[in-house]
Image: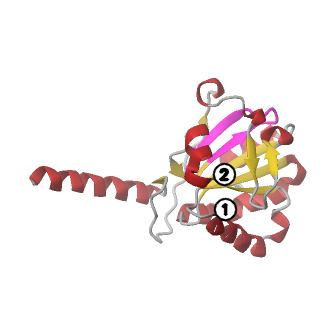
Amino acid sequence: MLKTVVLFLFIIIGILGLDSAGVLPLGWVKSNSSKSSYSSINKINNEKLFFNLHNLSLMSLNGKKFLLKDFKNKVVVINFWASWCEPCKEEFPAILKLSKKFKKKLVVIAISSDFSKNKAVTFLQNFKKIYPHSFKFVYGVWDKNSKITQKIFKIIKLPETLILDKNLKVVTKIIGTKKWLNGEAYELIKKLL
């Protein structure tokens, strides 16, 4: 019995630690806390983590298929999120503003790990009402059962974001929220453009 209580306490402490850091394991629902964590940029070794992403086929929320290679010669920001993730909600407006700022040079692929497609659609529609001109280069994708998120990209926490250069090589993985309109992520994107 004592072992069970101790194990339970360790699990609770671990969850609270992730919650206060602003990231949660995929599938865990975050409280309404507005705390965010600003992560550092992590350099990525493409050969070890990802296959050739050029031929990755995705389906947008409006039913149109597209390939990642359609965006060659543009910087691509792939943001992994869910409507229940408070840090995702906090950072998404800045990602939309970034998309508007760099227009044709940058594409955002927003991949939702929501439990239902309707939740993902509603989330994006709500932001589209507030930022209507930012959605021209934003592609919403619902990842049913998180197969793309977890199996292809090895994403285990939300939000996470990958930044791909113009050759579609992943140069950065950001775990947690980021200041997208200034700071190191913004400077990196400007440099990649």
Q: In this rendering, does residue 178 appear at all?
A: no
The answer to whether residue 166 is magenta is yes
Amino acid at circle 1: Phe
By secondary structure, the bulk of the magenta-drawn segment is best described as strand
- Left or right of 32, for residue 89: right
Q: Which numbered disc flags the more N-terminal residue, 2 or 1?
A: 2
Q: CA distance from mark 2 to mark 1?
A: 9 Å
- Left or right of 153, for residue 169: right
Residue depicted at 72% across the width and 41% down the height: 188
Q: How is the image coloured?
A: secondary structure
In x, y percent, where is residue 132? 82, 70
Where the C terminus falls, by quadrant?
A: top right
Which is more foreground, mark 2 or mark 1? 2
Q: 75 and 189: which one is in front?
A: 75
The region drawn magenta spans: 161-175
For mark 1, what is the residue? 92
In x, y percent, where is residue 17? 37, 55
Q: Badges 2 and 1: C-beta atoms under 8 Å apart?
A: yes
In x, y percent, where is residue 50? 64, 31
Q: For residue 74, what is the image quadrant?
A: top right
Amino acid at circle 2: Asn
For mark 2, what is the residue? 79
